[in-house]
Image (cartoon, grey):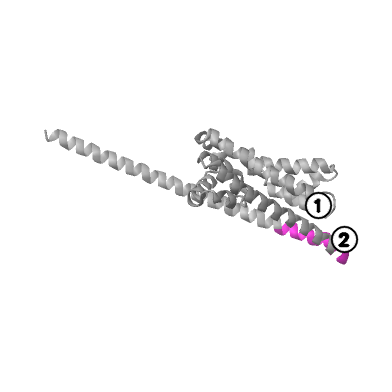
Amino acid sequence: MLQHFNALVDGLPPLLVYLLIAGLVFAEAALFFGFVFPGETAIVVGGVLASQGRLSLVVLLPMAIGAAIVGDSVGYEIGHRYGARLLDTRAMRRHRAAVRRAQNLIRRRGASAVFIGRFTALLRALMPALAGSARMPYSRFLVFNALGGICWVVVFTFGGFFAGAAFEHVAKLAGRGLSIGLAAVALVALAVWAWRRHRSEARAEKEAEAEAEGETEEAEAGDRSEGAARDGASDGSWYGR
């Protein structure tokens, strides 16, 4: 995904690259785009481009931070306005396990869940809307939203920046061909790690869904047993008259 995005921005003027990165970061939670494209990919590539002198960190950092905070605030407002109806949308139903995990995190951690969720792709897309639907006070949400947005953007932007700078340093020392080979190996390792993480998350989501279905069946069985007991009690009282 990093390669595709890097190819996409290659040759674009800096202003459009800034706007594209900010737009993707904004849309991650505001439009639930994070289900498809994690915003951290955009800011990592932004950091790499900054290490090459194609972008300025002085411009990139505040733009990305502002987009992260505003995007999550829009997601919060969507959740606050639509509440339970939002949970019944197809996107939410497809990620029921992640939704339950985010809701449990909000119940356990309160507003700090907004900060914690910032560093996990699916939770980052879900958390603002779920915080809004849970009627979390916006002032508390905004504090942890801002803290999480600042830390998240700074960490991943500088991660991309130093990775890009290290690549250029290796290229000077070992030659361009060897450095490209090492970068390709690193990208393959990253792709394998991302694939394994995706499989692990999918497996956990299926297990959570199976567990939830089992709990639902147990609850329904309990309701049926209680109903049968009440019917038996009413029958007994009828015949005893």
Where 146 falls versus 77 (above or below)? below
Whole-percent x and y of residue 161? Answer: 77, 56
Residue located at (33% from left, 44% from top): 222
Q: Which of marks 2 and 1 is in front?
A: 1
Q: Which of 139 and 59 is in front in this view?
A: 139
Residue located at (54% from left, 47% from top): 98
The residue singled out by tag 2 in the image is 176
Residue located at (81% from left, 59% from top): 165
The residue singled out by tag 1 in the image is 50
- Mark 2 to mark 1: distance in Å? 20 Å
Range covered by the magenta-colored residues: 170-189
Residue 185 is at least partly visible in this image: yes
Q: How many marks?
A: 2
Q: For residue 35, which quarter of the picture? A: top right
Whole-percent x and y of residue 92? Answer: 55, 40
Secondary structure, mark 2, is helix
